Amino acid sequence: MLSIKNKFTLNVVLIFSVFALITAYFIQYILNHKPCNLCLIERIPYLAAIIFISLIFILNKFEKIISLIVGLFFIFGAIVSFYHFGIEQGFFNESLVCNLGSSKATTAQELLKQLEKETVSCKDVTFRVLGLSLATFNTIISIIISVIILKIVINYEKNK
């Protein structure tokens, strides 16, 4: 059985994950800021948190293992976000994930099709809040959520 403290914490993570995804889609579709490939990958932990935390509340079983999975997703998110932050700051080079479709067009039609895709470079910051990129915020948030979730997993037996 999930303790009240753990249930509250998981509810906060669930609500924050919903808020984070709504914000990301608002920025993308309403404010028309195109995300790069890494931005899209950075949404995965939030989607996973929504699915897995909902599963905890539906099943009311396997809380510890599912919480661990959510924690691992956010560790993955922190690593990807830090890498993205590093690309933005010039610490790292763009990888194949950031592939800008650099294949050579042989005809004018192929060139036009490539230009229509409007792929965004991972090093270009198209949206800032308080002067910081979303990758910077996501790095910090993912680390905080990882620590919180892993603390729940480690102290699970104590909080039962």
Image (cartoon, helix red, strand yellow):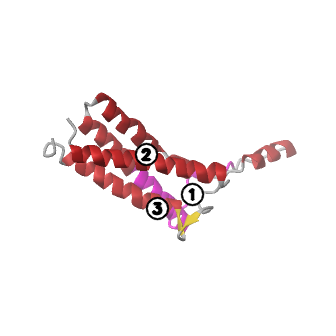
Asked if the residue at tag 1 contacts the one at tag 2, i.e. Cβ–Cβ closer than 8 Å, the answer is no
Tell me residue 94's x, y (percent): 57, 57
Q: Residue furthest right?
A: 108
Q: Residue furthest bottom?
A: 131
Circle nearer the N terminus (2, 3): 2
Between label 2 and label 1, give the one nearer the viewer: 2
Residue corresponding to mark 1:
94
**Residue at figure coordinates x 43%, y 47% from the top left:** 17
**Residue at figure coordinates x 40%, y 61% from the top left:** 140
Q: Could you classify mark 1 by the number of other residues whose Cα lies within 10 Å: few (under 14), some (14-19), or many (20 or more)? A: some
Q: Quadrant of residue 60?
A: top left
One can see residue 66 in this view: yes
Asked if 30 appears above or below 1 in the picture, the reply is below
Q: Could you classify mark 3 by the number of other residues whose Cα lies within 10 Å: few (under 14), some (14-19), or many (20 or more)? A: some
Which amino acid, by three-letter code, is at mark 1? Glu
53 relative position to 150: left or right: right
Which amino acid, by three-letter code, is at mark 3? Phe
Residue nearer the viewer, 55 or 36: 55
Residue corresponding to mark 3:
137
Which residues lie in the magenta part?
Answer: 76-101
Residue corresponding to mark 2:
45
Q: Residue furthest top?
A: 59
Tell me residue 130's x, y (percent): 53, 70
Q: Main secondary structure of the magenta part?
A: helix
